[in-house]
Image: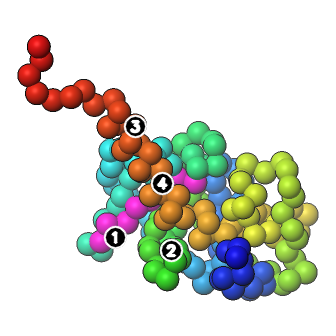
Amino acid sequence: MSLSETKPQEPMAGQFLTFFIAGEEYATTILKIREVVEFDTITVVPNTPAWIRGVINLRGSVLPVVDLAVKFGLPPSSISKFSCVVVAEVACGDVFMTMGMLADSVSQVIEFTAKDVEEPPPFGTRVKIEYLRGMGRMGKKFCQILDIDKVLSADEFLAATDSIESAQMCETPPSGPQV
């Protein structure tokens, strides 16, 4: 049974938050967004994938922040006065996790009708095709509509963390007396 058969797909029409990463405009359904916060101090966590920028203190809670630029194979995002963290609710099975996405800036909330959304092309995007839900028509250009549950997949995060831990265990010299 495929994932699409087990979980109903979100509607392709509705309101979407658009934001910029490395000069490209992306969108995600507003229903997944909890808030947008100003970029502030970030704490780097050792032994995490390169695309995990670190964690921030969000009103006393630890919030992991993903640098989507790195996740999409681009150089790390540069921090500017417009940088922000888009806080999203991500489905992980039956549980929801709160995660942040580092964005160069937030653009707008836009309404897409079903006619405004095209299938993503099988080539030519910086983003893995499984991360895309569609291409939203915005006048003469398109923005890439992300499937935020797949982009911020907890399973992918845990798999990457496990592989880093395994690699470190292989590199760690045995402790004890040296003969």
Q: Nearer the viewer, mark 3 or mark 1?
A: 3
Q: Is residue 38 left or right of residue 179?
A: right
Q: Is 21 drawn above or below residue 95 in the view shown?
A: above
Asked if residue 109 shows in the view, the reply is no
Q: Which residues are magenta?
A: 61-68
Q: Is residue 97 left or right of residue 9?
A: left
Q: Quadrant of residue 176?
A: top left
The amino acid at mark 1 is: Leu
Classed neighbour count for the residue bearing mark 1: other residues with Cα under 10 Å, few (<14), some (14–19), many (≥20): few
Marks 2 and 1, Cα distance to the nearest angstrom? 21 Å
Classed neighbour count for the residue bearing mark 4: other residues with Cα under 10 Å, few (<14), some (14–19), many (≥20): few
Q: Nearer the viewer, mark 2 or mark 1?
A: 2
167 vs 88, nearest the viewer: 167
Res. 58 mark: 1
Q: Main secondary structure of the magenta part?
A: strand
Point out residue 141 in the picture as x, y percentages from the top left corner.
86, 61
